[in-house]
Image (cartoon, rainbow, N blue to C red):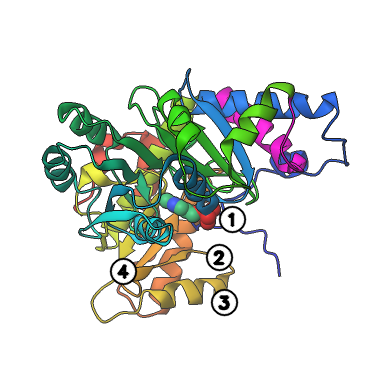
Amino acid sequence: MYTPNPVFIPGPTNMPEVLRRACDIPTIDHRSALFGEILQPALAGVKKVLKSKSAEIFIFPSTGTGGWETAIANLLNPGDRVLAGRYGMFSHRWIDMCQRHGLSVDAIRSSWHGGVPLGEYEEKLRADTAHDIKAVLVTHNETATGVRSDVSAVRRILDAAKHPALLLVDGVSSIASMDFRMDEWKVDVAVTGSQKGFMLPPGLAILAFSPKAMKAAETATLPRTFFDIRDMAKSYPTSGYPYTPPVGLLNGLKLSTEMLLGEGLDNVFERHRRIASGVRAAVAAWGLKLCAQNEELYSDTVTAVQTPDGFDAASIVTHAAQKYQVAFGAGLGDVAGRVFRIGHLGSMTDVMALAGIATAEMVMADLGLKIRLGCGVAAAQEVFRLGDVSSTRTAA
Ligand SMILES: *Cc1c(COP(=O)(O)O)cnc(C)c1O
């Protein structure tokens, strides 16, 4: 059954009541002018959140995964070479999708405690003087490991190698919560979904295409129908849709972008940074380590906590759900059983985060871990009281 407790999973995230209500509207004729009053501000709002002037925004009834498929199918040709690192469950799944689309993937296996393998990317791109590599994939925030990668560094590598490959970025768990600079980083396609930073129910794949990506989409030959951005691009100027749009969710997205821009993007990012610092201070007080191997990699939206050897991290998630009706994230893939995850993105406040930290403490104490009740809460309280991010760095 439902619980009034917030969730601490890294998506779907908690929904503000006003956004829930905004999704719940009577049927309208999506071919009437009314629809344009929903669609156009939603598109414009997303573009602002991405700090882009030049991107085209596309919104499909789908999820983040459908967003990946949209990027691949619209830009690439069967057999095209793409470069991708495998450093967590989501970067892994994206590689799998590319392979299933018949692409030739240079998949670089790297540590699930680190980010995008910059050194290997540089080597591969410099060596590819024939420019066979058509796209470079980056998962900005690995939700499985709580690791943020440096997208701007990948752009610098591409530019230094004078390599024309398209830069495709999974921003599903970063966009609208952490700084994302579509134009400055010259990202060609950014992908996200409705149920993470935008604080909405699942159901929308949200994408941005650069002018260069729009051009590539004209000639790409992988099969695409439902996800063909050309049909969307033709319909949007007259506020049309190639099929029935999810009007309620789009109305929610319109309001979500108004809320984010109203709070101020810098304030939204600062709030996420502060809450993440508080959570990390708690983890340090518990004497536990993060999955992310160093400070530059720390995610502001999700924290993956390593449990001691021999302890099943999944039991934390199960026990928290059963005894306290609180949801944390389990470890996925290579780190299954060894980490649990605290999601702290979207509609999240310092006060909500304290409840999550306090619950995690009770759960770990119940399960026999040596946790002094209140120590993590106290550490986070200091961060939230003083708002001083710099004093809260933890040893990873
Ligand atoms: C959640 C997530 C996805 C998958 O999105 P769905 O909406 O579940 O399809 C992809 N990438 C990252 C980084 C995510 O966090």
Using the image as rendered, state which of residue 199 and residue 120 is in the foreground.
120
**In-image side of 212 versus 34 (left or right):** left
Q: Can residue 255 be seen? A: yes
The percent position of residue 209, horizontal first and vertical second, equals 48, 31
Part of the protein shown in magenta = 239-263
Query: Which of these two is toward me, 211 or 86?
Result: 211
> Residue 58: x percent and y percent?
58, 34
Measured in 3D between alpha carbons, the distance from the residue under mark 2 to the one under mark 4, in whole angstroms, is 21 Å
Mark 3 residue CB less than 8 A from any atom of ligand 1 = no
On the question of residue 263 being in view, the answer is: no
Residue 151 in the image: x percent, y percent?
30, 36
Residue type at mark 3 is Gln
Distance of label 4 from label 1 (alpha carbons):
25 Å
The three-letter code of the residue at mark 4 reads Val
Label 2 neighbour load within 10 Å: few <14, some 14-19, many 20+ = many
Q: Is residue 202 above or below residue 2?
A: above
